[in-house]
Every structure is written in C-alpha cells, then in structure tokens.
Amino acid sequence: MINPYQAPPEAYGSAERLGNPLADFRLSARQIRFAESKFLLHRCGGRLTLASLVMIGLAIVVAFDLPGLPSAGNPSAWYQISLVFRELAVMGVAAAVYLGLIRRARREIRAQLRSHGIIDGTEITVQANHPHLIWTTSGRTFTTNLSQIHLINTGKGLIVGLDPDLFLFVPRRAAFSHSSYRGFVRGLKQAMAS
C-alpha cells in the first residue's frame, strides 16, 4: 500500500533508500560531558573497580579502633570526632585517587574530540554504510570500520566507541532518517553483524 504522506523515493538520499541507519543531531556541552563520563567508566572500569575495593578496605580499617591512637579503648567524644576526620580523610584520598586514575585518559579523550570537531553546538551526521561508519562534523567527514566500533547503551542515547580515546554520542532525540532511535540502534547492530 502506498503511503500518501510519504515523499516520493527520489526525494530520499541513497542511504535512506538502501535502509542504512542515518542520524542527524547537534551536541550540547552537557551531552558531551555525560557521554565522556560514561565512556571513561567503560574505558577505565577495571582500574576504578580495583581502586574502589582498596578504598573500601581502607575505610573499614580506619573505622576500627587502632592501638596507636590516644583514644584506644576509650569510646569518648574524642574518638567519635577522630573517626569522622579519619573517614573524611579516606573520602578525600579516594576522590584524589579516582581523579588521578582518569585524568590522563580524560585529557586524551578531550583532545581527540576537539581534533575531530566534536565540540559544543556541533552538527553531526552519522551513517552506517556497510562496512563503514561514516560521520560528518563541521564539514569534515570521517570513516571507521564497523568491525572496530563498540556500542554503549545509556538512558540518554548511544555511545559509539570509535577508538580507545574517541567516541560519538547519538542522543535519543536526534533526527533519524527513516526510523526511531531503536530502529537506528537495531540497524547499526545489523550492519555491524553483517
């Protein structure tokens, strides 16, 4: 059956006629920061998990009464105050360790994003055209093999990992060529599988 509201096939680009997933969107700084944090969790997940376990162990050790402290064996107000300060010190050390673990990776990712033109307010077009993922930012076109990318689903969109230090974020509210967000993700996964 012919859809009277659909434009004639000549009006579509070749990507839409072939059924290749296509998304067009403008990224905001907030979306880039969100995607960067999720991408860093995936990239540095093992190190962050190990650091978390060490920090949990340190917090447990600090919570117990240590024999060298002046309050040992005397649960007074001094002990409770010193316990609070020890726990705050552990939280400060944990924050410094976490930031130290991701600092270099974050700097490299941000440099890659800037060099590829992925900055606040950039119009980006992403198209899966087997065997490549083609994406355009501010007049520059880049190509990556579909076999080299990995996908990270989030509540706000899809993170496409292109490189260890480079990603694209496709928001759920992007303009998709001939489908919805789910259709775009499904088409991208099918293009990756074939």
Image: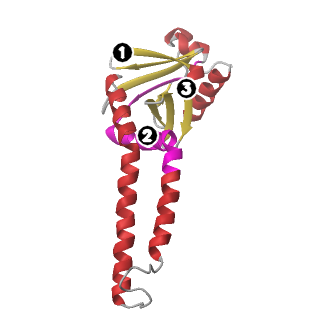
Query: Residue at image x 39%, y 78%?
Result: 83
What residue is disc 2 on? Answer: 35
Which quadrant holds the N terminus?
A: top right
Answer few, some or many: residues within 10 Å of disc 2's Cα (few below 14, many 20 plus, some between 14 and 19). many
Answer few, some or many: residues within 10 Å of disc 1's Cα (few below 14, many 20 plus, some between 14 and 19). few
- Work out whether residue 80 or residue 24 is closer to the camera in this orientation and state it: 80
- Work out whether residue 86 or residue 165 is closer to the camera in this orientation and state it: 86
Which quadrant holds the C terminus?
A: top right
Real-space Cα separation, disc 1 to disc 3, in angstroms? 19 Å
The boundaries of the magenta stretch are 20-49
Q: Quick one: SS at disc 3?
A: loop
> Which badge, 2 or 1, comes first in the chain's sequence?
2
* Horizontal relation, residue 46 to residue 68: left or right: right
- Tell me, yes or no, whether the two marked residues, 3 and 2, touch with CB atoms within 8 Å: no
Which amino acid is tagged 2? Answer: Ala
Query: Residue at image x 44%, y 81%?
Result: 67
- Tell me, yes or no, whether the two marked residues, 1 and 3, touch with CB atoms within 8 Å: no
Q: Position of residue 137 (x, y in %)?
A: 37, 21
What residue is disc 1 on? Answer: 140
What residue is disc 3 on? Answer: 149
Real-space Cα separation, disc 2 to disc 1, in angstroms? 21 Å
Q: Position of residue 159 (x, y in %)?
A: 49, 35
Question: Where on the picture, by quarter, is residue 6?
Answer: top right
